[in-house]
Image: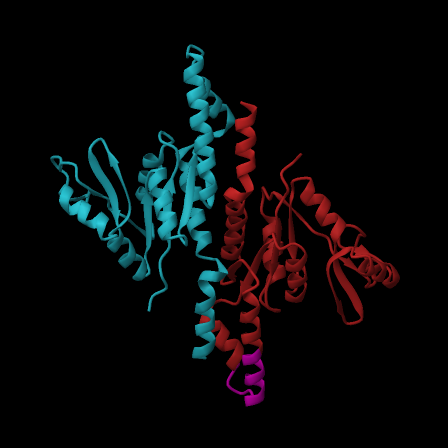
Chain colours: A red, B cyan
Amino acid sequence: MAERGLLIVLSGPSGVGKGTVRKAIFEQPNNDFEYSISMTTRKQREGEIDGVDYFFRTKEEFEELIASGGLLEYAEYVGNYYGTPLAYVDQTLASGRDVFLEIEVQGALQVREKMPEGIFIFLTPPGLKELKTRIIGRGTDAMAVIERRMEKAIEEINLMQHYDYAVENDRVENAVSKIRNIIECEHLKVSRVIHRYKKMIKEL
Amino acid sequence: MAERGLLIVLSGPSGVGKGTVRKAIFEQPNNDFEYSISMTTRKQREGEIDGVDYFFRTKEEFEELIASGGLLEYAEYVGNYYGTPLAYVDQTLASGRDVFLEIEVQGALQVREKMPEGIFIFLTPPGLKELKTRIIGRGTDAMAVIERRMEKAIEEINLMQHYDYAVENDRVENAVSKIRNIIECEHLKVSRVIHRYKKMIKEL
């Protein structure tokens, strides 16, 4: 039986650049993990392929999957469902391949509940200066706007505690290299490799 | 106050090449950690400098330190004591610098007891083939010798469970690169950086 693959979850505040970092990761050569294809009820656009860009499903089919526990996580967004089919993730992990998810923070919390053994990476905005800029804005914003941004920043930071790693998105290539390192290091964890060594000993 | 540094402990079975890997790590440019200097009661050799190669102490001084809990770990080896002074490690960590220890497995277990938050890396012999070769020998060994080697290998693998990471010493440069990655990744752990982000928010 193959050693179970790792589930890698990349998430972070909206606007932090998760999608860009994920795309850059998958453009690298020698990636040893599978990208999990999302399922959606939104209309298939021209050029999009079912099972490649998304799994396109009807609302009824999607809701059946929700009811039967067939989704690792899901959310509704402007009237459409988006989610991660559990079966694909589970089968890929069981075959020994790592699976990479890039999802919103609320979805990531759902995954943490169902697969706590996953590796959860929180992408953060680059440093104090950037955070200040995002919150204070260009100096022309009303106090209410600034306060709302403050609250959002505090909420975001509080979500970080549910994650294993925090990676600053200062430059895309730095974030990519850190995320690839994290995956490599996680494969070196004793808890993941010790049974392989024990098996070696038995087979001697 | 500076963020506390990380304690990195490299250990592994005798003969696996810990010393070679450690030397190669410290020959790399841009190392951001301090090597912990050992204390010993053995005679200072020509060319050795007290406080650089070792802290040279008398047997009485060393035993006083043992009694007062001033050693992070120690062992006796052919009539001489070898150990790691706690004060140096603790002060360096408190100043925010990482400390790198390369020690024997028995010493590493003592450190795990006293500083469980350390990063414990177990260097392993390169793969099944090598392990088999080491155990079976060149085909001329008596059954008793082979059995003793078997027992030792099993003991060694069982020690691995007290460590966080297992790094195969297949080639020194691979082991070095993996160990450096581990240190980098450990600095990205949410548990280590979240207070920095919380501080940011407070200071806004």
List the single residue furthest toward the front: B67
Q: Is residue B62 left or right of residue B89?
A: left
The percent position of residue B190, horizontal first and vertical second, equals 49, 61
- For residue B18, which quarter of the picture? top left
State yes or no: residue A148 in magenta.
yes
Q: Residue at x 45, y 13 (%)?
A: B143
The percent position of residue B35, horizontal first and vertical second, equals 28, 47
Q: Is residue B199 above or below residue A11?
A: below
Q: Is residue B4 left or right of residue A192?
A: left
Foreground residue among A40 and B151 = B151
- Number of numbered discs on residues: 0
Q: Is residue A97 left or right of residue A193?
A: right
Foreground residue among B86 and B183 = B86
Which quarter shows the N terminus of chain A? top right
Foreground residue among B9 and B61 = B61
Q: Magenta region: which residues? A: A137-151
**Can the viewer see residue B19?**
yes
The percent position of residue B104, horizontal first and vertical second, equals 33, 38
**Can the viewer see residue B29?**
no
The percent position of residue A147, horizontal first and vertical second, equals 55, 84
Q: Main secondary structure of the magenta part?
A: helix
